[in-house]
Image: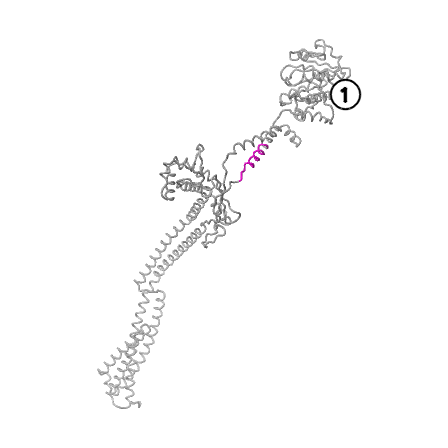
Amino acid sequence: MRIKQFYKLMKRNWLLLITIPLTTAASIYFFTRNQDQKYVSDTVLYTGITSGYKIDGGNNKAGGWNTDEIAFGNLMSLINSRKMKEEVGLRLLASHLMLKQHDPAVLTFKSYQTLQQIVPATLKKQLVSNTLEETTRNVFQHYKRNTSNSIYRIVNPTKTDPIHSAYSIAALSEISPNRIGQSDLIKIEYNSTDPSVCRQTLELLTQVLTKKHKELFSVQNEAVIGYFDSATREAYNKLQAAERKLFEFNKSNNIVDYDQQIVTSTEENQLAVERRNELEMQYAAASSALKAREQFLKKRNASNLQSQEIVRLRNQLSAVNSQIAELEMASTVLPESAPRLARLKQEAETITGKINETINSYYGSSNSIQGVPVKDLLNDYAKNAAQVEELRSQLNLMRKQQSSSSGKYNSLVPLSADIRKIKREVEVAEQEYISQVEGLKQSKLSQQNVNMASQLKVVDPPYTPKDPETTKLILLIMFGMCSSFFVVAGCIVTSSLLNESLTEPAKVVKVTSFPVIGSLPLLSNSKANQYIDVKKAEDHLTRQLLLRLQQKQNPHTPFVIGVLSSHSGEGKTSVSNTLTMNLNELGIDTLCLLPDDEDHQKFTSSYSSYYSPLQALTPNNPFTLLDGVEVFKHSVIIIEFPALLETIYPTSLLQHLDLILLTIKANRNWKDADRDVYDSIKGVTKAPIEVVLNGVIPRHVEDFVGMQVKKNRGDKPLQLPQSTTDYPKKQELLES
């Protein structure tokens, strides 16, 4: 559809385009003029989701780049949840039930009256207690009792309930949370008809939200902490059992530090072997020297060397030396044995001196064979005897020590595999315990993070609004008017596009493929300008027909025009009579032949005649059979055919036609039956078929005929014709 067509379509339906939007605006105003005024309050909360401080717990970035968006989404969903609205509504109701009389600071008088209506006095007496906490608990218990009690219906009203209070979920659905930009702040707005209720609702919402938000976050770590706690205790018990097993094993085998003990035992055993070998060599040398001295002295008849006194002293010296050796070995371990060691050494020197004195008492002053004095030999013998006894004592002690260290070493070596196995069990249990402790620590850090992050802080507390929200009635009316205007315009355009009727000449040409020779307007009233339009359209049709008459090749035969239509009532008779009258007034002898029936008797005139369509069916020259009328003396013959789709029509006349005028009513559609019948007619006659569109909207006639030139000021108005004989004469029509 072109812009010009759209403009004309809108201009034609201007009344609808004005009436319906105005009616819509009036309806909106009528139904919304008495609505309660809305009061709006808001509060701002700091969440700390993005920039809040957290203890590093290992799970702070588990959600990736969109963690913050998810957290804010969870918070918004929590605010908009049904449970949240239920709790806020019930707490608000409980706080209002505590009022003994109307308090303007808490709620308006209208809201107080509504409260008295929805909560009967008997129910209020059951619910109200001494404190707000007890009253709130009673309200919650009554709400959860069943779905048919009064409190439940207050919070969840049905469509049939007459009163919808501020405690209902529907009213609390006006809560609107939004994040402020990309910050950690969220702004929660709420509108209500009561300014005090608006503020109280946001205060209760903040309290409930803080509690539920913390619970929601805390629940996430409770299961994890519980798992690690039990796992840690189990791992600790395993570690204790393994350590107890190691302790019992060490205790039963006299082990303090196995690795150190096995090393020490090995070293002691090796040192004992080396020391014993050394002592054995020293003992052998001393014994050999002592024996040599004894042999020498025996040769000198020194038999007293084997006296009981000397033997006793030597045995005594041997015992003392043994004690000295033991104390010297133990002195590094037992420092308190030093005094005894010194005393024993002194005793050994004393015994050695006694041995010397005893020997000297038995032998006189003499010299040996080698010239050595016997006294010197006796002294050497006494020293050698003391040395031998000392070495013998040390050697015996070392042999015992070696035997002890070897036994200790031999007892430790077989325990190596068992103690390694037990230590491995201890290490595994210890690692498991450490791992579980680390997991418990991380989960507790995460829980602490949650506790810190879930603490919502009120930055801007809710307030009691003083002025109602600016009315949106004007915007609503404007929106309703514009919407209805566009809807009506769309319906008009859609109806026009879907309309398949032949409303204008251009559409007729497109649908029927026949050219349009004339377009006659539709008369809707008796205004003068409509008669002028009709006359102008008829004159235009006459001029077009005059052009067709000039195309007649044989001037000796009449120009025969057939006026056809598919159905009756499409204007054939009107077109035929109009053309006959106009042509005769122009001096062109024209005869109009009408079907001989009752419907056409009223159109009798001096220029018309009748024929029988049945007689015209003869294949002979049909014009000689038309009631004896001589038709060849006329210049133009206009023959009106019966309705082609309703009755029999004279087919034999078709081949004698020079022009076919097809009259079509502008308010009907072009059917397949129309197309078929005229395709058949085109096969019978060579006469061109042109359409006369009847009953056309005047604006389409103006487009086809041409716009009338506007009159200048002072021109006389056009007078209406008094009768059909007052039509313009020939010269006037030709000059028009």
Q: How many marks?
A: 1
Placement of 449 over or under 283, stated as above or below: above
Main secondary structure of the magenta stretch: helix
Quadrant in the rendering for residue 547: top right
In the picture as drawn, the residue positioned furthest to the top comes out as 628
Q: Circle 1: is it few (<14), some (14-19), or many (20+) Cα within 10 Å? A: few
Work out whether residue 612 or residue 367 is closer to the camera in this orientation and state it: 612
Secondary structure under tag 1 reads helix
- Is-magenta flag for residue 520? no
Relative to 251, 639 lies left or right: right
Relative to 599, 476 lies left or right: left
Placement of 16 over or under 375, stated as above or below: above
Quadrant in the rendering for residue 321: bottom left
Q: x, y percentage for residue 466?
A: 50, 42
Q: x, y percentage for residue 711?
A: 73, 26
Work out whether residue 622 or residue 596 is closer to the camera in this orientation and state it: 596
Work out whether residue 435 or residue 347 is closer to the camera in this orientation and state it: 435
Q: Label 1: which residue? A: 734
Q: x, y percentage for residue 632?
A: 75, 12
Quadrant position of the C terminus in the picture: top right
Quadrant position of the N terminus in the picture: top right
Q: How is the image coloured?
A: one colour
Quadrant in the rendering for residue 618: top right
The magenta segment: 470-485
In the picture as drawn, the residue positioned furthest to the left comes out as 308
Relative to 636, 294 lies left or right: left
- Going by the numbered disc 1, the residue's amino acid type is Leu
Placement of 236 over or under 561, stated as above or below: below
